[in-house]
Amino acid sequence: MCQLLALSCAEPTDVTFSLTGFAARGGLTDHHVDGWGVAFYEDRACRVFVDEKPAYQSPVAEYLKSYPIKSRNVVAHIRKATQGAARVENCHPFMRELRGQQWVFAHNGDLRPFGEIEQSPFAPVGTTDSEAAFCFIMNRLYAHFGNQSDIDDIDAVFDVIEQATRTLNPYGIFNFVLSNGKVQFAYCSTRLSYVIRRWPFSSARLVDGDLSVDFAERGTPADRTAVIATTPLTDEAWTFCEPGDLLMFHSGVLMRRAHVPVPADVLATSKYAPSEQSAVAA
Amino acid sequence: MCQLLALSCAEPTDVTFSLTGFAARGGLTDHHVDGWGVAFYEDRACRVFVDEKPAYQSPVAEYLKSYPIKSRNVVAHIRKATQGAARVENCHPFMRELRGQQWVFAHNGDLRPFGEIEQSPFAPVGTTDSEAAFCFIMNRLYAHFGNQSDIDDIDAVFDVIEQATRTLNPYGIFNFVLSNGKVQFAYCSTRLSYVIRRWPFSSARLVDGDLSVDFAERGTPADRTAVIATTPLTDEAWTFCEPGDLLMFHSGVLMRRAHVPVPADVLATSKYAPSEQSAVAA
């Protein structure tokens, strides 16, 4: 299964620590070997780095470790291909511009084809179910916000994403993270967890590597970070999402939550049912 | 003035040589110091690397030199800001997806505001005249090809770009390169040149650095590369475009040419009028 990582930070944050643990899953401590990618927002701009090589041996990952970028919003993904070849255009995160904002998306799961859909204005470049789902959501957002409605009305954006998620849900496992550079949306179809770091900070130790960070040495009262990941990256007290949780984070704060039920047949076919998730957490 | 570089190659080509000479202009041999960027196509995918630092001291440029990417189509840009701050979102090349193709654009020149324009579906993320012009062209392409027309009818694409160029031309200096990963479009408003390398190859020496390459050692009869740049990068026999030349390259071949006249007042205000261009070429 693919791995998702997203960060929502109140202040520009050096995300090397989380990326290091996450990248280790790209073939070193886990079997995720068909590419990886990361998107960093720097205010309005978004840099996307993707590689069709495993993260733990990717020169781009090595470069990023030596040149940390500070960011408030990050979306990262390690890919175990279920659909689409190991090619650059099939690597997450995917990016599209809507109303002068860059939007990025990464998916974990496997969707059956959802038939003839609107491919305008957004259409997939590659051959994954994931990019098709992203374009579906973006076309729904465009239909609502394309010309007039206020794209900064983030609750209205949430509503459109909730409806799109409800539509795509029956087609399979659909864990995702989605950001416009201000807000992080995250949906738990079968498996997702998060932790919020805030003042006063303590230390954390990576699950996937021999590395600890004492955030107390670095953090200020203004800092606050939500880390969202498929499975916990550290020994901190992570919250395991319930299947169906749609979450919205802003500046490290969980702003809104909705429940978009996961169809029983999807949960039943999942290799990562809630019971197994609990076992992982134990 | 900014610097443009584009390559159109019949075979995936290691473009390190051209990029090296080009990057030297980013603050080392020329006064272009407000950022740079490069977009590489790998089949359908396009990687974009941008930096708001001068190219000659950019860690991204350093990384790219140590990890050459082979590509058939490349668009690169060194930025001397005329409009918009030195921020990541203002760095060229800009990218948008249309009909499942990634399109990239870089501009050299300075356009006055062209008033109320269609900002749908494509709108600028940053504050440059260049990205606004790119979105203008993309919205024209969307109006024509958004739903039904054959986006692979490259002559029809050329016609739309020619019309858009004619519309934007009165607003100022508008040298640009634009690619969809298959074809390279290039417009000479005031200054642009190109060279075509083909079998049997000879050697070339960079104008901006102490570096020569003997292409004869590497090239095969299948190789063919068109290099398009603001000013010649090498001591080869470059062709200087006439102001008004709109060119279309595919696989290193100049496929089509049109003339979109540059208004006299634009030519008159240009600091890089044809006479100066000739002097440079001498």
Image (spheres, coloured by chain):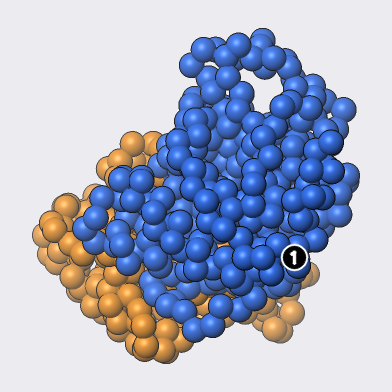
Chain colours: A blue, B orange
Q: Quadrant of residue A226?
A: top right
Please name whichever residue, B88 or B232, is drawn nearer the observer in this view of the structure. Answer: B88
Q: Mark 1 — on which chain does it sit?
A: A
Please name whichever residue, A208 or A175, is drawn nearer the observer in this view of the structure. Answer: A175
- B255 lies above or below A23: below
- B261 lies above or below A261: below
Q: Identify the residue at the far front of this view.
A: A264
* SS state under label 1: helix
Residue type at mark 1 is Ala
Q: Position of residue A280 (x, y in %)?
A: 83, 42
Please name whichever residue, B108 or A98, is drawn nearer the observer in this view of the structure. Answer: A98
Q: Residues within 10 Å of mark 1 (few under 14, many from 20)?
A: few
Residue at x 64% of width, y 14% of height: A201
Residue at x 71% of width, y 72% of height: A83
Left or right of B120, for residue B197: right
Q: Position of residue B155 (x, y in %)?
A: 38, 88
Residue at x 41% of width, y 89% of height: B150
- B50 lies above or below A227: below
Left or right of A192, for residue A71: left
Q: Position of residue A30 (x, y in %)?
A: 86, 49
Report whether residue B148 is seen. yes
Find disc 1 in the rendering and name its residue. A268
Left or right of A84, for residue A187: left
